[in-house]
Amino acid sequence: MQYEISIEGPIFALQRLRHELRCFSPRFEKMPQWSKNEEEWGRISFIETDHGLLDDTLRGLYRTITSVEKALSLSTKFDIRVRNLAYSEPSTGSSRFAEPFNPVPSITVQPWGTSVPQTADDRTIILDPHNAFGSGKHPSTRLCLKIMDLIAKDTSNTQRLRGGKVLDFGCGTGLLAIAAIKMGAKSALGVEIDGPSAEAAEGNVKLNHLSRTIKIKEGSWDAVQEKYDLIMANLVASVLIRTGKYLPGHLKDQGLAVVSGFGENQLNEMKQLFTGIGMIISQQFTLESWAALVLAKDERLSPSRCSTTTQA
Ligand SMILES: C[S@@+](CC[C@H](N)C(=O)[O-])C[C@H]1O[C@@H](n2cnc3c(N)ncnc32)[C@H](O)[C@@H]1O
């Protein structure tokens, strides 16, 4: 089993800590600065492969960290994170995740902190998942990205992404909200019930310099005040069953909603749920046993109503 231990903090303090921890040969990375006035920030990390040694390693690490914090009279404490790489979302934090990849051809996800240059350009998303869901590798996320890509490329007047207002409900890392902007949306709101995940999303928005176009709110449907052109909701089936009824109220009349996060075997149940609350199934997609539905409020938007299942 592999545990990734990472410590974030101001660069000058990390350099001292790195020296103290030299027996672990830690990897050192500089964090991209979000503004010129900001303190230079970075991260050191190393892998502990021996489960039996983890407690001792962490005890020693906390002692060293406390002594460095005291010696330097640090006003900001180091931020320590331990991740069991076996239980992370597929590839989050593992070496495989540390390579840029294309969940859809039009988008490159550049994991934060690799030695590769960090460029937040029109098609590249810099992502630090922390412990939030949404690395871009999970089939349910890839389905959402694939559908967004198709909507953005749709040249008919029913496309709702380019120039539109997008809601990423259950945003996790904020990946879908960021991707929406990269694909041409005017603005996006990410809503996330889990505090640390909402913080991770906020950090990713900053890493991509998108604070002016993307807002992140911690909460659930109560945090959503407006109506949206496109709603992305990649949530597990139980959450869709519990809260799906609020979706139509936040979708513009001509808007589209994409629900994902459930298995192919739950497709019928999900279709019944959403048709039962006045939605029309415009399209359905499947990928590696996961499924997603494109929903509309207005029948005129859905000529191919439920006619096909597309393998994404
Ligand atoms: C499957 S993850 C999707 C993350 C990301 N949007 C993606 O597509 O990869 C679902 C996220 O929804 C969040 N969530 C669950 N219930 C929620 C609720 N009622 N309101 C807001 N967020 C919720 C979870 O904490 C989790 O981060």
Image (cartoon, grey):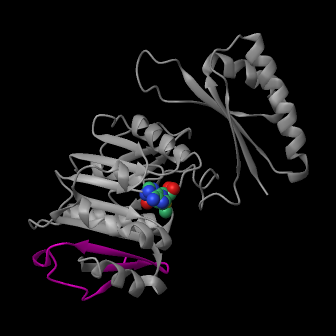
What residue lies at 28% left-to-right and 81% top-to-bottom?
Answer: 275
Q: Where is residue 206 drawn, in percent x and y?
A: 41, 34
Q: Nearer the viewer, residue 238 or 22?
A: 238
Residue 230 in which image quadrant: bottom left
Q: Nearer the viewer, residue 276 or 55?
A: 276
Q: Is residue 105 above or below residue 307?
A: above
Q: Is residue 220 left or right of residue 226?
A: right
Q: Where is residue 28 drawn, in percent x and y?
A: 65, 31
Tell me the quarter of the image containing the C terminus: bottom left
Residue 247 in which image quadrant: bottom left
Q: Is residue 310 above or below residue 237?
A: below
The magenta region covers: 284-312
Q: Is residue 77 left or right of residue 22?
A: left
Q: Nearer the viewer, residue 272 or 203?
A: 272
What residue lies at 50% left-to-right and 42% top-to-bottom?
Answer: 200
Q: Does the magenta run of residues contain 88?
A: no
Res 135 visible: no
Q: Does the magenta run of residues contain 300?
A: yes
Q: Is residue 151 left or right of residue 31?
A: left
